[in-house]
Image: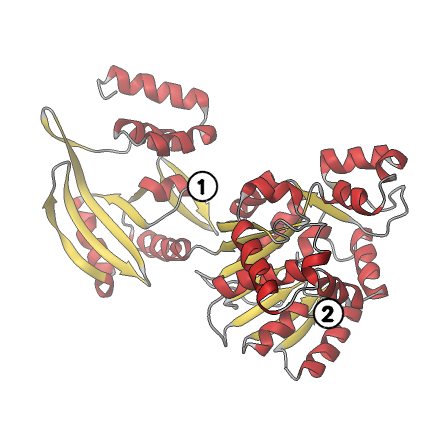
């Protein structure tokens, strides 16, 4: 989002006019705050970790985390909200690490890998274009340390008609065109016909995880933070002690159930910056400098193509000679030295390495056993994927998909198929059938 754009100005004015609004809102909506805090408590690293609260407004979460010993930098578009946050922190007897003014789409004042965790609990509401939301998520990922969590909230697509049913039942009949715009595009535009000063994007539940993945984040969970009491929370909110705790436990338990995600007001995506990506970038740079040829294969290659599969370790194919060269380059990372190893199915010059908790397997001159004996495994297609500015060689996704089919991994193949190029897949299929492989 251009910091000088009219939409930015409108959002800034909205929060500057009533900076206490968000603090009071979270006081009223206790379940949203409690479930979000439960998620933070589950996934944050322990204090005194460095936390960037991006879009934290008057500091409701920042102050609470500071109470727990976290070093929180509060960053927000609203100057008035930042001033109020300073007052709230002083009243709570805590100190924040810093107060910064700006837009979530530009975190350039912060270095790469500078924070242990990032909170993005608001900015995505007001970024009307998908490209802006991607940029905000990408910036959050950039300033986050590898392996660190990013918490991003979205207003759910059907929050508006649910709000209308509870508060202004005549609203849909008065503004049918605006309702249709929100339902089909998710956008409440500036100057809306109902006179609202709120400018927002309402995310369909189905778009949350793909958007986070496109920004290079791995999705751990998506939570409907109102649980099952969205719009019917008044009676629950007056409870205390054990009665209140029971409801918090219940709503946190049910928050991850996708069947309720269309009937909550806010969705919280719990994501992480994958540690394996930083490891692979480091390895790729060193191998390029050394002139060592390799190809990333297996689940890592599939993930690099954008398929949402978990990456447990990194698999690299190379020649036998280069497998030993790899070992020489990373001698301090050796777990199992490179040696000719033979199993029931595969044979290769195999070595295992540990990079900050990420296992890397290097396979030199890989063979697999079929009915006729040992057959060399070769990558027949080649492309590169850009990993934060570093080119990484991988096979075509279609070749990886067919490899899953060949090995009977039909579950993995099914995940890959929607991302494959149909013509390319069929051409490879015919080629491998002609060779008697399939």
Q: Nearer the viewer, mark 2 or mark 1?
A: 2
Q: Residue at x 50, y 73 (%)?
A: 49
Q: Locate residue 22, reporting x and y percent.
A: 75, 63
Q: Could you tell me how far apart the alpha carbons at marks 2 and 1 are, in whole angstroms? A: 36 Å
In this view, the residue farthest toward the front is 243
* Residue depicted at 39% across the width and 54% down the height: 281
- x%, y% of residue 239? 66, 64
The answer to whether the residue labelled 2 contacts the one labelled 1, judged by CB atoms less than 8 Å apart, is no
Identify the colour scheme used.
Answer: secondary structure
Side of 204 where 374 appears, left or right: left
Residue 13 spot, x, y in % from top left = 84, 60
For residue 354, above or below residue 369:
below
Q: What percent of the width, then of the height, locates residue 414?
A: 40, 29
> Residue 370 versus residue 375: which sits nearer the camera?
370
Residue at the spot 36% in from the left edge and 34% down from the top edge: 412
Residue located beneath label 1 in the image: 308
Mark 2 neighbour class, 10 Å CA radius: few under 14, some 14 to 19, many 20 or more: many
Quarter of the figure with the C terminus: top left
Element assignment for label 2: loop
Question: Can you see residue 349?
Answer: yes
Q: Nearer the viewer, residue 42 or 216?
A: 42
**How many other residues sit within 10 Å of disc 1, few (<14), some (14-19) or many (≥20)?**
some
Of the two numbered discs 2 and 1 on the same chain, state the one appearing first in sequence.
2
Is residue 142 in view? no
Residue that label 2 marks? 58
How many dots with numbers? 2
Relative side of 398 to 350, left or right: right
393 or 412: nearer the viewer: 412
State which quadrant residue 300 falls in: top left
Above or below — where is 65 with respect to 102?
A: below
Looking at the rendered structure, which numbered label has been put on residue 129? none
Is 277 positioned to the left or the right of 30 in the image? left
């Amino acid at each position: 989002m251009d910091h000088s754009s009219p939409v930015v100005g409108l959002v800034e004015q909205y929060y500057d006019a009533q900076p206490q609004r968000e603090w009071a809102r979270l006081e009223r909506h206790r379940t949203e705050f409690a479930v979000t805090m439960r998620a933070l408590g589950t996934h944050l690293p322990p204090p005194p970790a460095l936390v960037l609260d991006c879009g934290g407004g008057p500091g409701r979460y920042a102050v609470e985390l500071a109470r727990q010993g976290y070093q929180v930098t509060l960053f927000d578009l609203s100057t008035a909200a930042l001033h109020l946050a300073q007052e709230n922190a002083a009243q709570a007897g805590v100190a924040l690490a810093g107060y910064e003014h700006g837009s979530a789409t530009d975190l350039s004042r912060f270095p790469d890998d500078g924070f242990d965790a990032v909170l993005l609990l608001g900015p995505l509401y007001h970024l009307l274009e998908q490209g802006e939301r991607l940029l905000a998520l990408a910036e959050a990922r950039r300033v986050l340390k590898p392996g660190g969590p990013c918490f991003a909230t979205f207003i759910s697509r059907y929050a508006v008609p649910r709000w209308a049913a509870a508060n202004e039942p005549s609203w849909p009949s008065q503004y049918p065109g605006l309702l249709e715009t929100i339902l089909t595009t998710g956008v409440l535009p500036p100057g809306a016909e109902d006179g609202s000063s709120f400018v927002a994007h309402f995310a369909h539940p189905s778009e949350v995880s793909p958007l986070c993945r496109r920004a290079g984040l791995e999705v751990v969970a998506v939570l409907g933070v109102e649980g099952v009491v969205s719009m019917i929370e008044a009676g629950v909110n007056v409870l205390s002690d054990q009665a209140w705790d029971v409801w918090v436990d219940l709503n946190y338990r049910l928050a991850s159930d996708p069947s309720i995600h269309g009937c909550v007001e806010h969705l919280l995506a719990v994501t992480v910056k994958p540690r394996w990506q930083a490891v692979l970038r480091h390895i790729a740079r060193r191998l390029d400098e050394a002139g060592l040829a390799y190809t990333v294969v297996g689940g890592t290659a599939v993930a690099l193509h954008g398929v949402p599969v978990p990456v447990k370790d990194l698999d690299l194919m190379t020649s036998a000679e280069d497998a030993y060269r790899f070992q020489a380059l990373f001698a301090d990372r050796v777990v199992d030295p490179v040696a000719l190893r033979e199993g029931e199915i595969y044979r290769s010059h195999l070595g295992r390495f540990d990079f900050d908790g990420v296992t890397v397997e290097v396979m030199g001159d890989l063979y697999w056993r079929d009915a006729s004996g040992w057959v060399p495994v070769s990558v027949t297609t080649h492309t590169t994927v850009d990993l934060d500015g570093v080119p990484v060689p991988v096979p075509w996704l279609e070749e990886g998909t067919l490899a899953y089919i060949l090995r009977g991994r039909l579950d993995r193949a099914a995940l890959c198929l929607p991302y494959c190029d149909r013509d390319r897949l069929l051409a490879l299929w015919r080629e491998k059938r002609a060779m008697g492989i399939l």
